[in-house]
Image (cartoon, grey):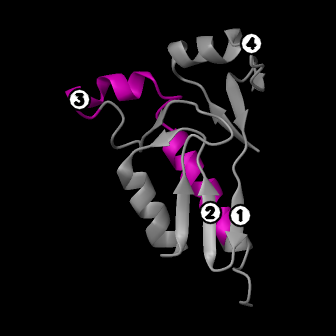
């Protein structure tokens, strides 16, 4: 489980008013989302609790291996996930940025997934 800050007022309203009962902390204005890693033979699956922009996916695949598959909108679906560089960078990203948790979501996601990858060797390796 990973805590993500919720900078977007729109997404905070979704989290706090949803009948789904999302785990959240009002004092720190964070949500908790579950990330998962599943190994099936040589394949590795990493889950993403939202819709990550392509550059995040490309970076994760480059760092975690060609046999890695990324499953988005899994466990939770907390909007778009952008890098800090992409957040509000272009007029085209206004909507995408508004319906994301915030500017730091991409960094937190990548850091936590790659930590899982580093700490868990693939089956059959030492």
Q: Magenta segment range?
A: 89-117
Label 3 and label 1: CA atoms lie apart by 34 Å
Q: How many marks?
A: 4
Q: Disc 3 vs disc 1: Cβ atoms closer than 8 Å?
A: no
The local secondary structure at tag 2 comes to: strand
Q: Quadrant of the N terminus?
A: top right
Please tell me whether mark 3 sits on a helix, a strand or a loop: helix
SS of the residue under disc 1:
strand
Does dot 4 land on a helix, a strand or a loop? loop
Q: Sequence-wise, which precedes: disc 3 or disc 4? A: 4
For the residues marked 2 and 3, what is the alpha-carbon distance in whole angstroms? 30 Å
Residue at numbered disc 3 = 92
Mark earlier in primary sequence (3, 1): 1
Mark 4 to mark 2: distance in Å? 29 Å
C-alpha distance separating marks 2 and 1: 5 Å
Return the mark for residue 38.
1
**Viewer-nearest of labels 3 and 1?**
1
| Residue 58 among magenta residues | no
Question: In the image, is 102 to the left or to the right of 30?
Answer: left
Residue that badge 4 annotates: 19
The disc, 4 or 1, on the residue closer to the chain's N-terminal end is: 4
In the rendered view, tell whether residue 65 sits above or below residue 105: below
Q: Is residue 87 above or below residue 57?
A: above
Give yes or no for contact between labels 2 and 1 (Cβ–Cβ under 8 Å).
Answer: yes
- Residue pointed to by mark 2: 45
Measuring from the top left, give residue 79's x and y in whole percent: 51, 30
């Amino acid at each position: 489980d990973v805590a993500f800050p919720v900078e977007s007022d729109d997404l905070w309203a979704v989290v706090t008013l949803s009948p789904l009962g999302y785990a959240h902390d009002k004092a720190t204005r964070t949500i908790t989302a579950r990330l998962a890693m599943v190994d099936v033979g040589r394949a590795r699956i990493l889950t993403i609790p939202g819709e990550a922009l392509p550059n995040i996916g490309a970076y994760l695949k480059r760092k975690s291996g060609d046999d890695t598959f990324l499953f988005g909108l899994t466990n939770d679906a907390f909007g778009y996930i952008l890098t800090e560089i992409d957040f509000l960078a272009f007029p085209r990203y206004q909507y995408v940025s508004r319906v994301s948790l915030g500017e730091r979501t991409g960094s937190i996601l990548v850091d936590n997934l790659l930590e899982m990858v580093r700490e868990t060797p693939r089956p059959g390796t030492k």
